[in-house]
Amino acid sequence: MIYKLVYNKTKDDFIELPVNAFGGISLPCMSSEFQRISINPIHVITCDDSGGSVFPDFIYDNAVPLFSESVFSAMSEVGTEHLLKIDVTITDEIDDITKHYILGLPPRINVLDDFGSIDEAKCGNYAIFKSSNLSDNRIYITEAMRMVLDKIKPVGMEYYVLSD
């Protein structure tokens, strides 16, 4: 089965990142244009005027996917070698808390059948990916990845069986 990852930011009092937190890499991240993205570490300061104090394990606004280090480590058991990886540090200056994340950008792969639906047989060895359809910004995972995530229950991350 194939599942779509969802960031459920309404579930808790999560930190909020500024709109321009990732500047010029947001659009290249949306389209998974690895060659247009610098792999230099990134530091982000949370919004002072909105958001809470809980750091989720997964943050995704349809552009830049962030995974906590522990989640990314667990995911690597199944396979993350094809992801673009960038170290990201997020600081909440009000509470003086800093957490480390991995920007783990999946590639876009041709997994669509003749009817525009995801064909699981075309996923190959990709346990996490995006569709080659540029209008689709969802991140997809395989059953093997879901099983790893089920064990650790990442805060802020939900996944649903793909039904479209």
Image: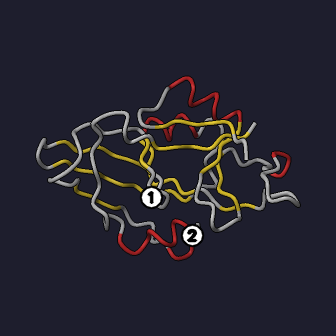
Label 2 environment density (alpha carbons within 10 Å; few <14, some 14–19, many ≥20): some
In whole angstroms, how far apart are the C-alphas of marks 1 and 2? 11 Å
Give the structural element (helix, strand or loop) at label 2: helix
Q: Residue at x 58, y 59 (%)?
A: 137
Q: Is residue 86 left or right of residue 151?
A: left
User: Do the residues bearing badges 1 and 2 touch, measured as CB atoms within 8 Å?
Assistant: no
* Residue 148: quadrant of the picture: top right
Question: Where residue 6 appears, x then y in whole percent?
Answer: 52, 43
Question: In the picture provided, is 78 more to the left or to the right than 54?
Answer: right
Q: Name the residue furthest left.
A: 94
In this rendering, the answer to whether 97 lies above or below 122 is above
Depicted 81 relative to depicted 53: above or below: below
Residue occupying the point 60% across, 51% down: 139
Q: Nearer the viewer, residue 87 or 119?
A: 119
Amino acid tagged 1: Ile
Q: Is residue 153 above or below residue 3?
A: above
Residue lying at the far top in this picture: please name it: 151
Question: Closest to the observer: 35 or 54?
Answer: 54
Q: Residue at x 65, y 52 (%)?
A: 129
Residue at 28% across, 50% down: 16
On the image, the x and y values in percent for residue 47 come to 20, 55
Give the total of numbered labels. 2
Q: Check disc 2 and report the residue beneath it.
A: 34
Mark 1 vs mark 2: which is more N-terminal?
Answer: 2
Q: How far from the left and from the top, in percent, is residue 125?
A: 76, 47
| Residue under label 1 | 86
Q: Secondary structure at mark 1?
A: strand
Residue type highlighted by circle 2: Phe
Where, by quadrant of the figure, is residue 61 drawn? Answer: bottom left
Q: On the rendered image, what quadrant is the N terminus found in?
A: top right
Say few, some or many: other residues with alpha carbon within 10 Å of mark 1 (under 14 / 14 to 19 / 20 or more): some
Name, please, the residue furthest toward the right.
114
